[in-house]
Image: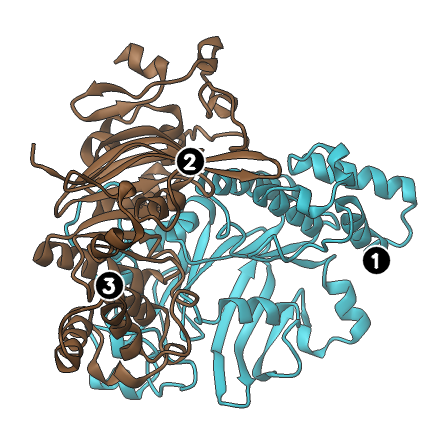
Chain colours: A cyan, B brown
Amino acid sequence: MENILEIKNLKVQYNTDEAVVYAVNGLSLELAKGEILGLVGETGAGKTTTALSIMNLLPDAVAEVTGGEIIYNGKNVFGMSKSELRDLRGSEVSMIFQDPMTSLNPVMTVNDQIEEVLKIHNPQMTKAERDKRVADILSLVGIAPERGKSFPHQFSGGMKQRVVIAMALVAEPSLLLADEPTTALDVTIQAQILTLMKELEEKLGTSMIFITHDLGIVAEFCQSVAVIYGGEIIERGTVEQVFACTDNHPYTSSLFQCIPDLETDEARLKPIPGFVLDPRTVPKGCPFADRCEHCTERCRTEKPAVQYVEEGHFIKCHLFEGRRHDV
Amino acid sequence: MSEALIETIHLKKHFNTSAGVVHAVDDVNFRINAGETLGVVGESGCGKSTLGRTMIRLYEPTSGKVLLHGQDITALSKKEFRSVQNRMQMIFQDPYSSINPHFTIGETILDPLRVSGDSGDKTSRLEKVAETMELCGLPDRYFNTYPHELDGGRRQRVGLARALVLNPEFLICDEPVSALDVSIQAQILNLLMDLQDSRKIAYMFITHDLCVVKHISHAIMVMYMGQVVEYAPKQELFQHHVHPYTIGLLNAIPTTDLSRRGRERHLLTGEVSNPINPAPGCRFANRCPYASEKCREPQELTEIAPNHFVACHECARHA
């Protein structure tokens, strides 16, 4: 299948006064058209930096792309001119942020905020067409169009997130980046928003990268999954392949083991020893080596290569060398 | 049945606001035995944190009683309460804002001993601090560091050490792991459970995460808009939950089990409304798929199985 997005060996660092933070270290990722990919990882793993890089939205003052490229529909995002970027952002790729409370403008009505997107990306549209489109998208996300005259503070958290989704989708982007869109919401509201996003996906055929730390959401919502640790993708496969738990990166299996589960009764959880990798250092070998129970001398000195265990399922770990099943 | 360590009787906390009276906690009754954990679950704004704070009189209750070993602590004077206070401690959700950034870790953990008027001299206090730090998995080299030098998981251990240094019998944990990464969350949960085994501390564990609550609790109380809707021992609640809200809540949790993928989900519609001047009937009625005329009447907690209470006339009738 054709890829809508290809990230090749991306490296991003933040140069701060105190230290250099290596957020993304050689990350490669491909996304097929129409695919919903769950990008899973813990705090500081580089999830948001990756998403911001795709839109070339990294803060110029501190962030520096030190290597790699991001190809969107055949064009390198980092080589785009200002006007090309303007066409890319919003109309081709759009993003939903974690916190709906802070991603809306408090002094503009909801209608105006959504309409603004159309004014910029579809200047040929008339006012009447825009109004109709705004009303349509609001009812699509489950908000009565009359409420569009309200200001964000008059909405609850779940409703605000619906507005943000409406804004992101109004220009019909081909790729949607959702950065923890439900983390700030209650579970019952989260379930509503996820169901809504899934329906919209089916209706509009948008490709999606869904960033989350919740493996449960990935299992129910995504088609494929990429696990990120220390700024690299360490495992990638379809949800069926990864969640079958037969072949997993040691980090992925430990993640599964340290989540309390509703189905099973375990007296003790098995936490991952140690702490998340300090992003001020780049390890010579595998980023997970310090916390891994299978760690060998080789893991500390040599970066593991991508090992395919099945078609479409790879694991970056020395353990899986030569374990490739026949493809 | 063993004697309850802590018990609430018709506990209420109302807040007067310009918009009306907010019924944050409305007539809540429960008991926790020594060495046991009560999980309190509910969505934001259901009054679970207010309940926790009211129990240790961070908020003065509007009415009702809190009994510690049978003694009503809400009737004590400020001075008398001081001595009881040491036996009840609390840890907070956000390990970033709940620790004073100007204090070193050692000072933070030492402070409760100073405030509570611990009789020991300086050396014995420092010994206690060192002991507690070790218990909570904090190496003693952190004694002179400041909170900003630690990450979230270690800070939460500091919050826990600060509560434990007074050797409390009862600990209120207000979402202690929801700000942490899953790998760190498991470490803190294991630590809490180990401490319960070794020191017989009772916990009230407030959370919105049902998986966590299932893991750590002995009994579970589900709250909705200030009221208890279902209250049962853990196994009973997960196997035979009957209240429509509990069903909706459990259904909404995404699981990693692929066989549950694409199952029919009974999603709750609507959202939690404001608990300002609520009508006397069931507060869940406007989101409930089975709501009827009878739901406008006040709902009483009814025991439908041993120790399993439900506040729903429909469920009580079918039981």
> Is B161 on the left or on the right of B259, as rendered?
left
Few, some or many C-alpha atoms within 10 Å of disc 2 (few <14, some 14-19, many ≥20)? few
Q: Is residue A325 above or below residue B213?
A: below
The percent position of residue A241, horizontal first and vertical second, equals 35, 53
Q: Is residue A249 visible?
A: no
Tag 2: residue type?
Gly
The residue nearer to you, when weighing A294 against B7, is B7
The residue nearer to you, when weighing A308 against B131, is B131
Question: Mark 2 highlights which residue?
Answer: B262
Q: Dot 2: what SS?
A: loop
Query: Which quadrant would residue A121 be assigned to in this image?
Result: bottom right
Q: Are marks 2 and 3 on the same chain?
A: yes
Q: Which residue is painted at 45% across and 54% down in the image? A: A224
Tag 3: residue type?
Gln
Question: Mark 3 highlights which residue?
Answer: B187
Q: Which residue is painted at 65% across and 38% down in the image? A: A141
The residue nearer to you, when weighing A247 against B241, is B241
Query: Which quadrant would residue A143 be assigned to in this image?
Result: top right
Question: Mark 1 highlights which residue?
Answer: A120
